[in-house]
Image: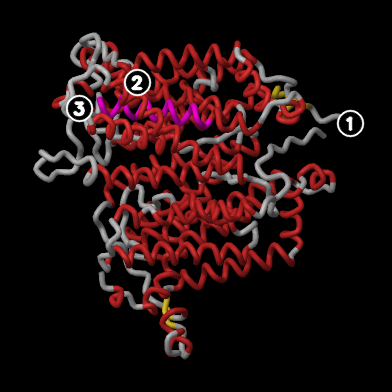
Amino acid sequence: MRFVLEKRPAPSRLMLGLTPILAVIATMLAGGVMFWALGANPVEAIRTIFVDPLFDPTFASYSRPQLLVKAAPLILIAIGLSLGFRAGIWNIGAEGQYIIGAVVGAGVGLAFYPTESRLVFPAMVLAGAFGGWVWAMIPALLKTRLGTNEILVSLMLVYVAENILASVASGLLKNPEGRGFPGSRNFARDYPAASNLELLPGTGMHWGVIAAFIAVIAAYVLMTRHKMGFAIRLTGEAPRAARFAGVNPTRLVVFSLGMAGALAGMAGLFEVSGPAGQISIDFGSGYGFTAIIVAFLGRLHPIGILLAGLLMALTYIGGELAQLMLGMPAAAIQLFQGMLLFFLLAMDVFANYRIRLKTREAA
Amino acid sequence: MDLGQIDPILLLASLMVAATPILLAATGEMVVEKSGVLNLGVEGMMITGAVVGFAVAVNSGSPAAGFVAAALAGAGLALLFGLITQVLKSNQVATGLGLTLFGLGLSSLIGKPYEGIKAPSLGKLDIPLLADIPVLGPILFRHDPMVYISLLIVLGVWAGLKYTRAGLVLRAVGENHTAAHALGYKVIRVRLAAILFGGAMAGMGGAYLSLVRVPTWVEGMTAGAGWIALAIVVFASWRAGRVLLGAYLFGGVSVLQLNLQAAGAAIPVEYLSMSPYLVTILVLVVISLRGKHGAPGSLGRVFHATT
């Protein structure tokens, strides 16, 4: 007697919805074991990460707004990535597009310092989106013109972007009044017209959060109602059929990478002008990579990504809390997020296959 | 800037040291891809190998034990990847990415207590007589044992793939898994073996970074070396000899830029540091100009036996 896998004609919709929840539960169990191995009470650790940031009377007033602040960039980037991932276009360099967007957008803002015009911030947002778009166009054009692998090129450009960031933080964009310290002027503190402040006090709502919600709705409409969304889905599920149906692969690559780059660039600008406050060597916090997990956990579906982004933001905040309260190392939460992706991918087998118990038949 | 400070003999000798981690990882990944599997987790396996090898070497005092432990750690992560992609048939690109993210987290968790410690020295293995040849001696024959071992492994992989039955089976599985299955070869088992080998090689490559090249543990120290190894496999058109060429070419670029930094070149440090990545992109572009170039036929595709 043994288990055999039987391929389903189409992925089970029930399982597609159910497996992310199962994966979260499995990760909590495995994470509990990890926390226990690190010398913490597993139940307390899980509660500190998933419950306390929202409901603990002392922390919730600080943590709840942080949920939106951390979720917004993750959702913005993951929505962009999901367009490409669904069509089998693997842009894994969102971190680089995010950084370049922040640098270009901040650069435009700083060029107008100290203009107090209402147009400064919108110009910065556009410049941020443009910067991310340009950075994503490099792998897109190399892929469509020359057939170069977009996975490796987009990733290599992350390291290039990090070096550019290091260069401008201590050079071109350095605060001339910063007493020689690296880092740009602080938008949130010194430059109100260019700052991305909290719109409603105590909610964490800033322009990036609004942009993220718009992106979710726009992506939903695109994927379900627009011809481009149909082309993306068709290419992902049946590339040959897509070609016969007249889908232009070049346009698809340019569109999906461009959208991902523009959204990541915008996310970078919102972060640098708001929560981070300034261009500095380490303002990024790796959202570009975590967004990949968010995209998969959300099943590459806009609504799913919205929920997954909030959950992942919760693990960030809960992780910080666990660091503070239980002395948990910062890396533990990164490992936790990695585990989540593993469990999810492993459970995909339930969506794509039927598992049958087979008795050995007489031959 | 004083270019006279750069000694060409030392430069070429350190080129071999700089290339070895990537050479090890790329050779392993080439075998994995030859079997038809794309494992994007090289970076994660490398950095886990780097931290495990370092921890074991520091605690035991033996770098050799460190390399063995690093190979086991790399293979352990690779086994995870193998089970999820081969048995549970997940998407290889996503799983490989997951492995990299997982490895980066795991390594920084393990590595915290080891920051700022120096690794025990592996020592040099001067090859008698050959080491005394002027010019060539210092460049080629005065290295640590791992440099020679890595070259022997490349030779072994080349010969193994080309001349042995096992190599032929591996290539058959990678070129057309359906046909290989019909001939009675165990596709999944062959692939799992290749994945384990690739993991062990990546682990050792990482350990070479933390035990010899740097030699200390720094969080995130691989800095994309695993991804560059992946690029070198593409550059090499899946051939062992060209993997060697690619790794040494890349080693040359990274050593040259470090030397230029030290010599105080007029180019800002950041632009020099990004040069290895730019060169990698450039190489990928040049390779893609040649068009389709010998990628294994079943690379990255899920194998599901129906009978």
Callouts 1 and 3 in the same chain: yes
Q: Estimate the spatial distance between the alpha carbons at disc 2 and disc 3, rounded to whole Å.
A: 26 Å
Q: Amino acid at mark 1?
A: Ala
Q: Label 1 marks which chain's residue?
A: A
Mark 3 Cα-neighbour bin, 10 Å: few <14, some 14–19, many ≥20: many
| Residue B39: image location, x then y, percent | 57, 45
Q: Nearer the viewer, mark 1 or mark 3?
A: 3
Q: Which residue is mark 1?
A: A362
Residue at image location 58% in from the left, 16% down from the top: A223
Q: Nearer the viewer, mark 2 or mark 3?
A: 3
User: How far is the residue under mark 1 from the one under mark 3?
Assistant: 76 Å
Q: Residues within 10 Å of mark 1 (few under 14, many from 20)?
A: few
- Within 10 Å of the Cα at label 2, are there few (<14), some (14-19), or many (20+) other Cα atoms? many
Which secondary structure is most common in the magenta stretch?
helix
Q: Is residue B247 visible?
A: yes
Q: Chain of mark 2?
A: A
Q: Earlier in the sequence, mark 1 or mark 3?
A: 3
Please check whether the numbered discs 2 and 3 fall on a single chain: yes
Disc with the residue nearer the chain's start (2 vs 1): 2
Residue at which label 3 appears? A187
Q: Position of residue A44 (x, y in %)?
A: 30, 22
Q: Going 54% across and 44% down the picture, which residue do you hit?
A: B40
Seen in the image, is B239 located left or right of residue A260?
A: right
Residue A33 visible, this orientation: no
Q: Nearer the viewer, residue A255 or A206?
A: A255
Task: Please say if A154 is above or below A52.
Answer: below
Q: Quadrant of residue A299?
A: top right
Question: Picture coordinates of residue A131 (x, y %)?
Answer: 39, 34
> Magenta segment range?
A257-273
Give the vertical position of B83 relative to A241 (above or below): below
Q: Is residue A261 magenta?
A: yes
